[in-house]
Amino acid sequence: MKYAERILSLPQYLFAEIDRKIAEKRKEGADVISLGIGDPDIPTPEHIIRACCEAAGDPANHRYPSYEGMLSFREAVAMRYERDYGLEFDAGSEVITLIGSKEGVHNINFAFVNPGDVVLYPDPGYPVYHTGAMFAGGTPYQMPLKKENGFLPDLEAIPGEILKRAKMMWVNYPNNPTAAVADRTFYREVVDFAKDNGLIVLSDEAYSAIAYGGYRPPCFLEVDGARDVGVVIDSLSKTYNMTGWRLAYAVGNSEIIAGLGKVKTNVDSGASQIIQVAGIAALTSSQDCVKENVRIYEERMDVLVTGLNRLGLRCEKPKATFYCWLEVPDGDSMAFANRLLDECAVVVTPGIGFGEHGEGFVRFAVTQSVERIEEVLERMDGVV
């Protein structure tokens, strides 16, 4: 059987490989503690589950959903942006429902990228920014995220010949995997840069609600002119512990939303209405559950960061996300991650898996209890 060239050129998907290694270790009988994949261990809040169960009993939700999503769900998204950011969006033309943000990150390439067009993406970064462009026949071009720049891309370093072919640019703050944050000054620079170079801006804000110490991450669309050039993709996965429910959305420029919608009408049949009803409950009900999530993650992060520093691994507490981006002593992220797995039965994500500029770092996700994180630190003592 001969695979298509686009399949053969794909790198191995990082998280699938991590799952394989965990399975092997557990088969050996090891008690593996995984701080590798960003999958919340906290259950979905009860009121969201109840809404889902009630929706499942309604025969109206047993039929094909609309491609663009229920208007009531899109109205709930628009309400969230008015409540949290003071921004008004037309639910009918400026919001679209996604079957998880990964789907949107991948499919939007097919709406705007022609073969040979350049897609600018952060490195290190979510692997689908790169592979989505490849699937569409585009040319991914990395924007290095370096420690000395606060893990923000240097837009002025992008060569002119690349910009002539560039069609889209990804930004992602609060950032995965580095946990870096961006301010409005940076977004102002991005908007101006996009207008000067005819770029579409795609701002992945999946961690917009997970922030510590009273910090509130700005939204790209808060900057004047942002909706002229771009959209935000956000998800209910991390905010409401709904990774397995597969529900997200894109909001912003109506032409970009329409282009994504045209692709979706041809490749999927829309998100389940049952799940969208649950999403409405999540977005429109009390947000105390989100505050409780943040409290739990911050407690865990404090334990992890304090413990890593005690072990001589210098790191700072992030302002947002549930990730800790740790610079490893010997600079070899894969060797460090493999040593933790082999000697401690602890899983962390090697930075090289997020791109070449992730080398030298590993990512810890605080998606385990305080007790398990303390055990991780005990196991690492004397090994690192």
Image: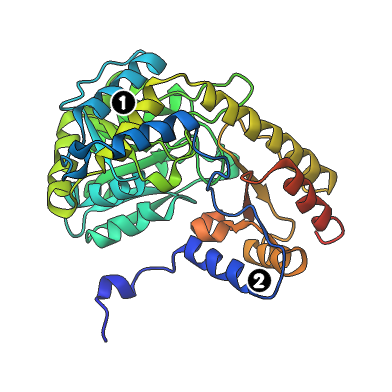
Residue 136 occupies quadrant: bottom left
What residue sits right under mark 2 in the picture? 25
Q: Which residue is drawn at 63% across and 54% down?
A: 362
Residue 163: x %, y % from top left = 27, 46
**What amino acid is found at the position of numbered circle 2 in the picture?**
Lys
Residue 9: x %, y % from top left = 34, 72
- For residue 123, side relative to residue 180 (left or right): left
Residue sitting nearer the eye, 20 or 72: 72
What residue sits right under mark 1 in the picture? 77
Residue 36, labelled with which disc? none
Q: Label 1 to label 2, Cα distance in Å?
A: 42 Å
Mark 1, Cα crowd under 10 Å, few <14 / some 14-19 / many 20+, is: many
**What amino acid is found at the position of numbered circle 1 in the picture?**
Val
Q: Which residue is drawn at 87% across and 59% down?
A: 382
- Residue 21 vertical position relative to residue 295 in the rendered view, above or below: below
> Marks 2 and 1: in contact by CB < 8 Å?
no
Instruction: Give the residue at the far bottom of this rendering.
Output: 1
